[in-house]
Image (cartoon, rainbow, N blue to C red):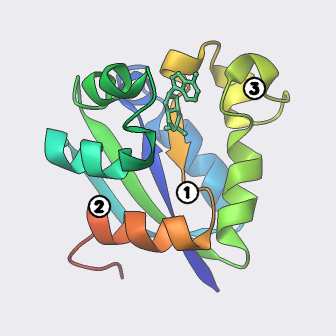
Amino acid sequence: METTLVLIKPGGVSRNLIGEITGRIEARGLKVTGLKLINAERATVEAHYAEHSERPFFKDVCDYLVSGPIVALAVSGTNATKAIRAMMGATNPIEATPGTVRGDLALTIDDNLVHSSSDPEAAAAELKLWFPEGTV
Ligand code: CMP
């Protein structure tokens, strides 16, 4: 059993895709063990993307994440991190396979709808950041 983090970005929330994305996760057999709709603090977003702080897109992606409400999900199940990464599809939606969230619902890397933890170690750190109170 493993727990991982998914963020539904402002574009996903404004396009009313919370149910679509969460529904796919639940239909796969994974459990939602944490769920919040929030206006993220800039400091939290910058900590979340700290590994990208030297990349040219860092400011834009942080601006984007604080531009509107987001949903943070803790998702638990067997191999949850790997399963979620596969379901979300390639970071750049134009390279994402049809059948994945990005391959079906997104078109550009700037608005790729979701973030998901890259591996179990990243998931543990990201869950601590977004769910400091813990999950159920
Ligand atoms: P995410 O999985 O949230 O991790 C970093 C985010 O930065 C990424 O999804 C994209 O939304 C955004 N981004 C913008 N440009 C790039 C890029 N060239 N490479 C990787 N990520 C990018």
Judge whether 14 appears above or below 21 on screen.
Answer: above
- Tell me the kind of residue under disc 2: Trp
- Tell me the kind of residue under disc 1: Ser
- Tell me the kind of residue under disc 3: Gly
Question: Looking at the picture, how far across and down is residue 97, in whole percent?
Answer: 85, 30
| Neighbourhood count class around disc 1 (C-alpha, 10 Å): few under 14, some 14–19, many 20 upward | many
Task: Give whichever of 16, 117 is nearer the camera.
Answer: 117
Comparing labels 3 and 1, the label whose residue is closer to the camera: 1
Task: Give whichever of 45, 98 is nearer the camera.
Answer: 45
Judge whether 52 appears above or below 4 on screen.
Answer: above
- Classify residue 40 by image quadrant: top left
For marks 3 and 1, the one nearer the N-term is 3
For this view, does 58 lie left or right of residue 116? Answer: left
Q: Is mark 3 within 8 Å of ligand 1?
A: no
Please count the marks in the image.
Answer: 3
Q: Distance between the residues labelled 2 and 3?
A: 26 Å
Question: Looking at the picture, how far across and down is residue 91, in whole percent?
Answer: 66, 32
The residue at which mark 3 appears reads as 103
The residue at which mark 2 appears reads as 130
| Neighbourhood count class around disc 3 (C-alpha, 10 Å): few under 14, some 14–19, many 20 upward | many
The residue at which mark 1 appears reads as 117
Badge 1 element: loop
Question: Looking at the picture, how far across and down is residue 32, in whole percent?
Answer: 49, 67
For marks 1 and 2, the one nearer the N-term is 1
